[in-house]
Amino acid sequence: MKEKKKIEEQIEEQVEQPIEEEVQEQAPEESTPSVEELEARIAELEDKNLRMMAEFDNYRRRTNKEKLELMATAGERIFTEMLPLVDDFERALAVIDDEGVRLIYNKFLAFLDKNDVHPIPTEGVDFNTDEHEAVTTFAAGEEQKGKVIDCTQKGYKLGDKVIRFAKVVVGE
């Protein structure tokens, strides 16, 4: 039995030695990168970092611009839906000269003015497609050609943005 164990141990030693030698031969040598390779890697990482910083800066600017635009026009829908009320007040004042209605109308106009909602001028101005919508044209002579003759519905701006175009009659 002892001989058998000795023989097995010898066989194991002989088998293990070549395997360890093979593993050592197959293991890749740790190569140290050259200075040029390291400098190229550093330049690549610096370029990536610079691009990421520029991309983030653009993102920050874009989101800040969107926030400012959103805040500037946040009430646009509300003000647009209030404009028919102004029209109704004006119609009521044309028929009824009531001091209470006029007071409420003036307060309402002051509220709109405070929130940067202003009527678009129409009387005697040149027709402007950026602010006016031509409902019809009217032959009014040479001096009225291309000018607004009458306004059928007031237009309004919220800041510099038109929230309702003025419906006008244009001279031809």
Image (cartoon, grey):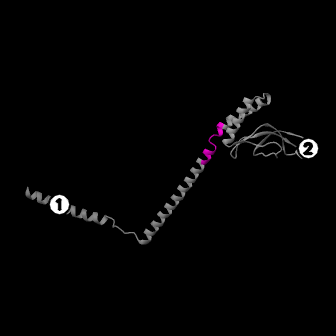
Residue farthest along the bottom direction in this orientation: 35
Position in image of residue 37 (x %, y %)? 44, 69
Residue sitting nearer the eye, 94 or 98:
98
Residue 134 image label: none
Identify residue type, mark 2: Gly
The picture places residue 105, in percent across and down from the top left corner, at: 72, 33
- The residue pinned by badge 2 equals 141
Confirm whether the magenta stretch covers residue 144: no
Q: Is residue 76 magenta?
A: yes
**How far apart are the two marked residues, 1 and 2, measured between alpha carbons?**
121 Å
Residue type beneath disc 1:
Ile
Question: For this rendering, which residue is in front, 15 or 152?
Answer: 152
Magenta span = 68-78
Of the pair 59 and 159, the residue shown nearer to us: 159
The outermost residue toward the left is 2
Under circle 2, the secondary element is loop
Q: Which residue is mark 1?
A: 11
Q: Quadrant of the N terminus?
A: bottom left
Q: Say left or right for 114 vs 50.
A: right
